[in-house]
Amino acid sequence: MGPSLDTLPIELLYHIIAYFDEDTFRQSLLALSRALPRTSVPTHFIFERIHLRHGDQVFQLYRRLRHAPEDAARVREFSFESWTVDADIFVNLMALLPNLKYLKMYIGPNFAPEHMEEIFQRPRTELRYLSMRFRPYVQRATYYQFLKGAYFDSTLFALSSWPKPSLPVLSIVQDPLDPAIAPTNFAQPLVFFRLDPLSSLAVSPLADNLEHLRLRVPARAVTRHLYSALHSFPALKFLDLSTSNVGAHDVAGLMGHLRDLQVLVLDGCPIVSQRIDIQLDAGDPFIQWAELGEAMALSGHVRALEREKKLRAWSEAYYANEREEEAARKGKKGKRGRKGLATATISLRAPEQAEAVQPSRDIPPARIPRRDERVRVLPPVPRLRALATSFAGALDGEAYGAVREEFERGWAVGIARLQTVRSRFLTNWHNGSSRVVRFADKYSPEWEEEAEYGEEGLVGLVDVVEENEFVVDVASHACPHLCIAGPKRDAAHIEGCGHGVGWDIYKDEI
């Protein structure tokens, strides 16, 4: 007899199975097992990757796995893509799957925040990919959610409480309200009531290893919550805030605080004016793209000025307190009598609400600047490699080229200004008129001190000691790739486009 498929070694079967298409993996594996009934085809692979697209499949799978814990333990990848399901059964199914590495789920109006809390109350330490897509919209008006306060803020707190996760990919998406999906003539339920939990997530253990974040909350201003706390998202390289309320100043803030950010996707965000007709009448239709490019190039400079202002206020308050304490020790009191000039006792101006600075005396002595010392913070050079967004209006080849040209021109102007600032600091450093410091490298001892003391004095800053630290390598900090083709794959995307990076990471096109 000739060779038979029934005698294939198990290693060859594994090799054949590795070529199965992901979308038809289960059907292909079952077909192979039926074609080779006398061969030990490893059908347990069926349970490694499970993709469900109908709500009734959840109950069928739950009924199968609750009596087969060995099969449930094999599940590594689980995807549920349906907006209708019995949420209680779904929660029970999730409790049977402790070893998930990949979890993708659609969260429709059947889900309550308590369901999500129960799913994530126990840390899933093996998880490497988590995608939650929310569509809470209903067909008939109901105010149950508003009256009960049923929002999914607690889901963010649950993720923030995980002690030592290693989750590099996270997606939290709320679908925009579309009249084709649900009525728009009454108030639809919200996913998140407050956005403060994002600040907790940004400095949680989960954020330590999070490299790719897709966060879409339509028309909500989310950016300041992503970097309001020190050391927010220290490992983040890819950020997608599409459909959120993100302006040009928000982009600069993100780049200034999230210094390792390399790809930014902002489809449907108002980073430039949507009124192209007004800009056309003004004779310079794309100047806002130049302004955006310049603001992005100078994002590190803005962050450095912000830190300098805090340092100056802290130093003034520190030495003012020192003078007061010294005067109190010597028993000196202010002289009585008439001052040289009379001062009005009333003012028609509204009082300024100045933030009081309370300098700490617990910081290391090396982090206290000398009295009247002039300290300058060297502005970092941006590391962004790609910006992907949408263009408001008709996009043809001529408009596409003009937008990119203006953006590159603005970026070049910003980098030139940055070079000028750093050159001026170099001169001051040479002649000793200023002490020049820079932001500490991530995870260095000086960087770690910020977690304990905050931005007190010189905490988180290190002295510039080499002349080459002032040099801007223009070649390695070229203008980011700008793609304005929008989220659709069949549009005119450029090579190195941020949209493509997102598709590769999340394996979808939402």
Image (tube, rainbow, N blue to C red):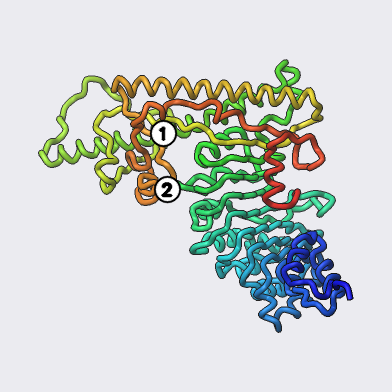
Q: Position of residue 296 (x, y in %)?
A: 57, 31
Determine the image quadrant of residue 170.
Answer: bottom right
> In the rendering, at what x and y percent does residue 369 appear?
28, 35
Q: Which of marks 2 and 1 is nearer the N terminus?
A: 1
Residue sticking out furthest to the right:
1
**Left or right of 413, for residue 330:** left
Q: As drawn, which residue projects farthest toward the front?
A: 1
Q: Residue 443 carries which label?
A: 2
Can residue 59 be seen here? no
Secondary structure type for disc 1 = loop
Q: Where is residue 239 in the image (x, y as percent from the top left)?
A: 61, 45
Q: Which of 166 and 289 is in front in this view?
A: 166
Report the amino acid beneath label 1: Pro
Tell me which amino acid carries mark 2. Tyr
Could you tell whether 237 is left or right of 320 in the image? right
Image position of 170 with respect to 230: above or below: below
* Residue farthest toward the left in the current orientation of the protein: 330
Query: For residue 32, which quarter of the picture?
Result: bottom right
Q: In this view, does 205 lie to the left or right of 322?
A: right
- The answer to which image quadrant residue 51 occupies is bottom right
- Of badges 2 and 1, nearer the viewer stands 2
* Residue at 66% in and 26% down: 289
> Tag count in the figure?
2
- The residue pinned by badge 1 equals 351
> Under tag 2, what secondary structure?
loop
Task: Give the residue at x 32% y 39%.
Answer: 457
